Amino acid sequence: MLLDVPGFIASLGLPDGCRVDQRVPKKLLLENGAPTAADKRLIANTVEEIQWVAALKPNTVGVPDYRDELREYLEVAVLAVTLRSQPAQDKIRPANAARLAELVHRAVPYPVLLLLYSGQSMTLSLAHKRWAQNEASKVVLDSDMVSMSLPEDAPSLDALNAFVQAIALTRQPRSSLFALYQGWMDSAQALLAAKLTGMFKAADGPEQAAIRRHALQECARLETEATRLRTLAAKEKQLARQVELNLALKRVLVQLAAAREQL
């Protein structure tokens, strides 16, 4: 299943009233979202077009805004960024895609459902926002982005189809724009969990979704630790130390299996 931006946007089921469908000048991202010269080069060399697809507001989707001491969600933006084909490959390098997504999220004061499209695959990313601690009027990212490549990160066609259905606007919480956006994030994390379990399963509620988020973080941490221990064990010359590293690896793998049970 090859996803493209129009197909994915259609799967969201956005009402006509929230559609914007306006091209955003690339210079706005260069001026407002590129803190370093390297970031400016990345944007200039890889971004072909930025499209503001939709603005989800209380009066366009019938979902209340959200305010607390950490954040204010008056709207949720849907943006699509088309990337230039690269000379040696059609897909942007993962590190560059991740950095570009971060720059776009940082440049927009509202939470964003962001699509980066390279012609062969699509990267979906989401990130909560909060007030900066030292500057009340400035908005910063709140924790890490939730990001995935489609269709690569789907373990099967069934899982991908289930995710595309789960991401529909009508299936998200409607108590507030924060809850709606969290619903999108939970659907994305369900697909990341399916990559490890082989099966897509939407969370039964906020509590289970929170358990899954923590389990995904633990899986990532433990997989990194397992890789580190394998590398050290392979290089180790002393038998006693090698045994010690392998025992540590076994303990980490047991913990990893337990974390996966929470997905």
Image: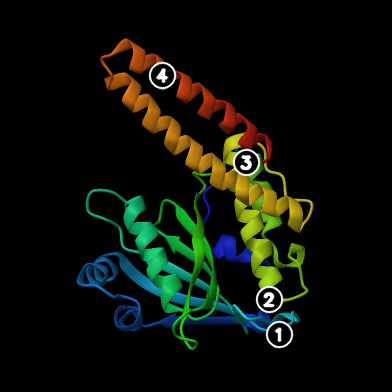
Q: Does 155 sit above or below residue 111?
A: above
Q: Label 3, secondary structure: give it.
A: helix
Q: Which is more N-terminal, label 3 or label 2?
A: 2
Q: Which is more N-terminal, label 4 or label 2?
A: 2
> In front: mark 2 or mark 4?
4
Q: Label 1, secondary structure: give it.
A: helix
Q: Which residue is mark 3?
A: 194
Badge 2 amino acid: Leu
- The residue carrying pointer 2 sits among few (fewer than 14), some (14 to 19) or many (20 or more) residues within 10 Å by Cα, namely many
Q: Which is more N-terminal, label 4 or label 3?
A: 3
Quadrant occupied by the N terminus? top right
Q: Name which quarter of the figure residue 158 lies in.
A: top right
Determine contact: label 2, label 1, CB under 8 Å.
yes
Residue lying farthest front?
240
Q: Name which quarter of the figure residue 194 lies in.
A: top right
Determine contact: label 3, label 1, CB under 8 Å.
no
Q: Position of residue 212 (x, y in %)?
A: 66, 48
Q: Label 2, secondary structure: give it.
A: helix
Identify the residue at horizontal 63%, vertical 65% (top origin). 10
Q: Does 166 sit above or below residue 233?
A: below
Residue lying farthest top?
239
Q: Nearer the viewer, residue 176 or 262?
A: 262
Determine contact: label 3, label 4, CB under 8 Å.
no
For the residues labelled 2 and 4, the Cα–Cα distance comes to 50 Å
Which numbered tag is attached to residue 244?
4
Identify the residue at horizontal 66%, vertical 56% (top origin). 186
Q: Which is more N-terminal, label 1 or label 3?
A: 1
Badge 1 amino acid: Pro
Q: Label 4, secondary structure: give it.
A: helix
Q: Which residue is mark 1?
A: 58
